[in-house]
Amino acid sequence: MALLVFVLAARAAFGQASVGQVEVKYLGARNYYAFTRVVFDTGNLRPDTFRMNFDPIQNQLVIYPSSGTMSLSFAPVHAVSNIVREVSFTQVNNQPAIIITLSSAAASGYRVSYLSEPNRIVLDFYGSDKNQDAGFLRLIRPVRTVAIDPGHGGRFFGSFRTGGMPEKELAMDIALRLRKALTAMGFRVVLTRTGDTEVSPEERAGIANAARADVFISIHASGSYGTTGQGPEFYTPGAGELNAGARPRTRMVWDEQNAPYLPDDLRLARSLMLDMGAMNGRAPVLHQTRLAGFDGLAMPAVMVELGDLDDPDQAQRLMDDAYRDRIAAKLARGIEDFARGVVK
């Protein structure tokens, strides 16, 4: 792994008068259909303290700390993608700097995000071919592995109706049925929890990322605290939440954000909705909103509320084994249709 060792004035990095040393790691690049992502770990130094200048003549982005000096030890990476030609380090005005050289296929401009815990600089470079925008309507990679996330667990029971199954148990029951159905279809499946345990949103995202899952399905059931609840509801991360240069409001996991997957999030939700239909007499509803932990997911993701446990009719259906088998089968078919590109 390539390393940069920055010797910076701590006043710039930490607001102190003495000199400190900060290690910055080049984490590498990852290629997607229409863009290339380059990621750096800035250690204890806040990522927004780095300056970035774009040289349109050389087609290069120059990145350097706002003050101080740094010593470098790095072997340049060539032919990163058809968009990013090289990541290297050089001297700019007698200061070492990170140089990202773009190819002629790159569009002007770039998208930068500053992540925390750990501190990261994430740079997305897009292709100049406008026809490649259609790539965001396709799968970024084939669907082979599905992450199933049974909601709640441990001391978090979720919604429940007296005498019935609490949401955490219902979610696990359907997750296991869905795993069986998907496995029979040939998919590899990973669960974010396999027992009645408490798992944080960041840990759930981390488990899915570590398994290199291609889609993420979070299973829940709602509670309306009344008698006329909503039917199946599907939630995807909201668009426009992470603008260029903006800091996310939630902790990030690894190097990824879900933002590039927003169109596929919607396509996955539509596929699931079409297969679920109006199973309990109520048409499914789609919501786009900020979802805890979804920012860190490196794959299309949907949260499913399968019904309202406070609604007597829906609760009775959800407590029926045969009905839960039907739910699992329809969710599996929706994932399969998404993987085959049936839904546009």
Image (cartoon, helix red, strand yellow):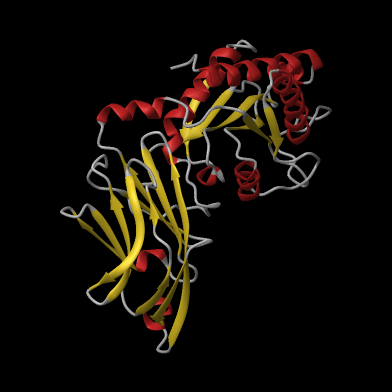
Residue 58 point in image, percent of width and height: 19, 55
State whether residue 247 is above or below residue 106: below
| Residue at x-position 48% and y-position 16% | 343
| Residue at x-position 32% and y-position 49% | 85
| Residue at x-position 60% and y-position 43% | 209
State whether residue 59 is above or below residue 83: below
User: 102 or 200: which is nearer to us?
Assistant: 102
State whether residue 86 is above or below residue 266: below
Q: Say which quarter of the image contains residue 7.
A: bottom left
Residue that extends furthest to the left in the rendered view of this protein? 57
Residue that extends furthest to the right in the rendered view of this protein? 163
Residue 207 point in image, percent of width and height: 66, 45
Q: How many marks?
A: 0
State whether residue 97 is above or below residue 199: below
Q: Say which quarter of the image contains residue 344.
A: top left
Residue 214 point in image, percent of width and height: 57, 33
User: 128 or 233: which is nearer to us?
Assistant: 128
Residue 240 in view: no
User: 295 or 289: which is nearer to us?
Assistant: 295
Residue 87 point in image, percent of width and height: 36, 56
Q: Is residue 83 left or right of residue 225?
A: left
Q: Is residue 182 left or right of residue 126?
A: right
Residue that extends furthest to the bottom in the rendered view of this protein? 18
Residue 75 in view: yes
| Residue at x-position 72% and y-position 23% | 183
